[in-house]
Amino acid sequence: MAGYRAIDFYDLDDQFSEEEQMVRNTVRSWVSERFMPVIMEHYEAGTFPMDLVPELAELGVFGSNLPEQYGCAGLNNVSYGLICQELERGDSGLRSFVSVQGSLVMWPIHEYGSEAQKDLWLPQLASGEAIGCFGLTEPDAGSNPGGMTCRAVRHGDQWVLDGRKMWITNGGLSQVAIVWAQCEGTIRGFVVPCDTPGFSAPEQKHKFSLRASVTSELVLEEVHLPLDAMLPGAKGLRGPLSCLTQARYGIAWGAMGAAMAVFDEALEYAGERIVFDKPLAGFQIPQQKLANMATDITCGQLLALRLGRLKDAGKMTPVQVSMAKRNNVMKALEISRVGRDMLGANGISLEYGVGRHMCNLESVVTYEGTHDIHTLAIGHELTGISAYR
């Protein structure tokens, strides 16, 4: 297959600054040259290419939209979105690794942490010296995070944490975890070094999706932390939900990267595959499929770009993020299913990317708020009536 050709049906390059294009092109080249040659091997083995972490740090993708004073790139949010697009064009597991590090670990420390927490952890996370994870979801508390049972109880000059978290990206790779727990009648966040006694992160195996991503359970058994381990600025459910808003923003862009990769592969395959003496692309049904895919991608690109401009202007709302995450991930999943179909039997081979993206997106449509939960968030905004209960 030829080199990657990103679809840009509406000439969106005109809407990006020179810096934004440079950031995108730099990450795009890195994904093509360094990540794509190894993704099939890691997906099949169920591993993440940790040897590439220093290169990701050198690219500046960890916390790329956070201030430079902590070793971050200080980019705008559209640039960060384009980074997510290009990373997920490689694999959802790659974008998830970077998204968790930046949006779910570095961002809450920067937004809600003490100066000591920022000074200690942000430079290490930006450089890739430390990897982080985000402990919110529990075995019986997914779409309703307020139903968590993890507890933090004060004993003298310490907090003692007990509980379990599930489906935690990067858990077994991490040196630090942001853990959310019920504490004194509300929800609070804690910065937990992963070498603290009582903390463990057994890996969750046997996945058919996000295989090139380490997913773990977090087990906290009488984990003793100093009082200053609490994030002082985060109190209540708004704390973890605001972190998820940051991550969902990146997902809205990332999903389009996966869809763009599938479209490019399906278009090239259809042009080369000879059926009944002419290319598959010369038949009406494949052309209809490609036209639908291109239209959905273009709509998703426009949605992500507008969301990014709103975020950079300080006007983005959580429900706008819900709409973009909901639309773009579902459209990407539908596109990947169509692309898999167009490749026939080859669509289930890891020699091609469409089946891998399809399986990954089955997770992306569920995590960071399911498709249905985002539907209800939008419905609540439109009607003023909550349908959650």
Image (spheres, helix red, strand yellow):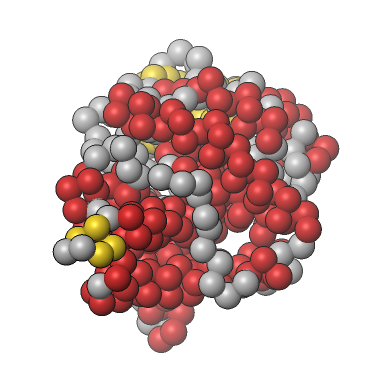
Q: Residue at x 36, y 32 (%)?
A: 40
Which of the pair 153/351 is nearer the observer?
Answer: 351
Task: Reply above or below: 234 against 163.
Answer: below
Please state the horizontal and vertical placement of residue 233, each as a whole percent of the image: 66, 46
Which of the pair 227/275 is nearer the observer?
Answer: 275
Please state the horizontal and vertical placement of residue 231, each as a whole percent of the image: 62, 39
Left or right of 267: which side holds 103?
right
Residue at the extreme front of the image, as rendered: 277
Q: Answer with the quarter of the image where residue 56 lies.
A: top right
Please state the horizontal and vertical placement of residue 87, each as a whole percent of the image: 53, 44
Residue 374, visible in the rendered structure: no
Q: Residue at x 53, y 58 (%)?
A: 6
Q: Residue at x 61, y 54 (%)?
A: 82
Left or right of 353: which side holds 197?
right
From the image, which quarter does the C terminus lie in?
A: bottom left
Q: Answer with the quarter of the image where residue 210 lies.
A: top left
Which of the pair 101/119 is nearer the observer?
Answer: 101
Q: Residue at x 62, y 72 (%)?
A: 11
